[in-house]
Image (cartoon, rainbow, N blue to C red):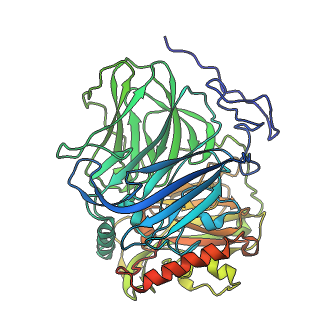
Amino acid sequence: MVEKRAPVPDPVASLTPDPTCTPGPRSRACWYNGYSIATDFDQKHPTTGKTVSYSLEITNTTCNPDGNAGQPCYLVNGQYPGPTIVADWGDTVSITVKNSLTTNGTSVHWHGVRQLNSCGSDGVGGITECPIAPGTSYTYVWQATQFGTSWYHSHHSSQYGMGVIGAIQINGPTTANYDVDLGTFTVNDWYYQDAWVANYQTLALLQQQQPPPAANNILINGTNKAANGGGKYAQVTLQPGKVHKLRLINPSVDNFIRVSLDNHAFTVVAADFIPVTPLPNQNWILFGPGQRYDVVFTANATSGNYWFRAEVAGDCLSANNGHGRALFTYSGATVSAPADSSPAAPSNGCTELVTTPYWKQSVDQSSFESQLKDLTVDLTVATLGTNGQNFVYWALNLSAMNVDWQKPTLQYVMENNNSFPTQYDVIEVPNEGVWTFWLIQTLQQTVSSTEIAAAPPPHPIHLHGHDFFVLGSGPGSYKQGSSTLNFANPPRRDTTILPSTGWLAVAFMANNPGAWLMHCHIAWHISEGLGVQFLEAKNQIVLPPSGSFNSQCNNWKKFAKGAPYPQEDSGL
């Protein structure tokens, strides 16, 4: 018999602490010390006084996660994905990254982490730090002011496609009850060729107005079977009659992916780091690179084995020659691969789920028309300062972004130098406590007097240092006027989809001084320059210690003098 679940309690109607609320299978809305799901972590958060520490080492090696022939990889602590960073809401997280690569610098970004008062730990070479030179280490320190699911990855050109990724799990309250937390579940594309080579191929194909190369497979928790029969499926054990929580992450380089679990429907309880009103009956979930969903489901089917499926979203113009599979088996059943006879994944448009944030917050509409800034995404001919060559590049804000690893944005701030190079694409947000509004539009542009024939792909737009409120999106050009937008508790997340040849309107409150990158999370596109950076309240930025910052930059400059591979793209 399936056990019935009591509804999630609403322990507080405001941000007032409730000392009687503690978490358990029947009270997942609760947390400790008066905090609960009702606590908007942008307004307040616990401070536990506890520090969790990790040591990560990035090395050159070979790997074959799906059993195909071994290939060059960069792995974190010798595994793929790297170790999961686990902390509780309010903990301080200290992570020392050692770069043991032979010919590459690196930096590690903690995707979606707000980095309140810790911009210097955001992990973006050329913006918040110089890259970590081979043979050296850097310690990132930040507080887990949010809770939920995310991931970390190299932010050094296309390097994360070589394997430098891992999951983040910050324990906290949930908007639905559950019995078993299955942990993080990465679902991503995988290429048999070197990510650097694939990046160069993508740039060459772009010059010919052609799409990037197709990925070779889809990995689930770092594994799958290859077409040649090698490899293995990820396996998960389910407890009959119990409610399970699953933390879905798409750390792909390029692919939008749909996922499902045969005979089990998902209820979505979080989008990126944002708790949402439970959204039930989701048989397939689409997510793009960088996006995450926390879901719950009940193991109430007949005891046996069920496929977890991951299929490339062709309607998002993604291409992959593989099919992702993992095996979910009820406890007590014999493990075996069931017949692969489920209906095909739907192809019903490249649109993300419309979710409702649990915390009801409206966006101030009064200043929308006067404060709205237009950021255009297009294809443009640009000369990157790092290589002096003219190429067709993706651009945001009408220029292809390009940073200098040897002089990051925060160094300009430290020196009180406001003369940022044009290619840094710095947009200043000088005042705190105000709403900022951004209209991002994809234009069908001409390049060298030649119309781009193919429709551009959708772009997963990610913002560092904040999440944003998604006021609206749609095909074609935005029609001036706010009447079609949603200002009353709109969807909120840190990575959202800009439609192909369409528009996206977002807003965020300026409340976190720092240098924050906003970019497309298709690795090839940010490599080609599709990004801008917001320099927010620069006089109030809590800067990293100058000693460690300068030491890291000096180490990088020494390495760069003889580096075998100079910067050849945006650096991001």
Tell me where residue 544 sits by quadrant: bottom right
Furthest residue toward right: 16
Residue 75 against residue 230 in the figure, above or below: below
Could you say where residue 23 lies in the image, as x and y percent from the top left? 67, 30
Q: Is residue 58 left or right of residue 418?
A: left
Most extreme residue toward the left, as rendered? 228
Which residue is rendered at x = 81% and y = 37% of the image? Answer: 17
In depth, the one of 31 and 527 nearer the eye is: 31
Residue nearest the observer in this picture, 21 or 480: 21
Query: How far from the left and from the top, in percent, is residue 550?
Result: 60, 79
Q: Is residue 427 left or right of residue 298?
A: right
Q: x, y percentage for residue 395? A: 48, 74
Above or below — where is 386 with respect to 373?
Answer: below
For residue 536, which quarter of the picture?
bottom right
Question: Residue placed at 68% from the left, 80% from the top?
Answer: 414
Query: What residue do we see at 76% from left, 50% from top?
Result: 43
Give left or right: position of 216 versus 300.
left
Q: Position of residue 42 (x, y in %)?
A: 72, 51
Observer-nearest of 327 and 493: 327
Q: In the displayed orientation, state which residue is furthest to the top.
A: 1
Q: Is residue 347 above or below residue 541?
A: above
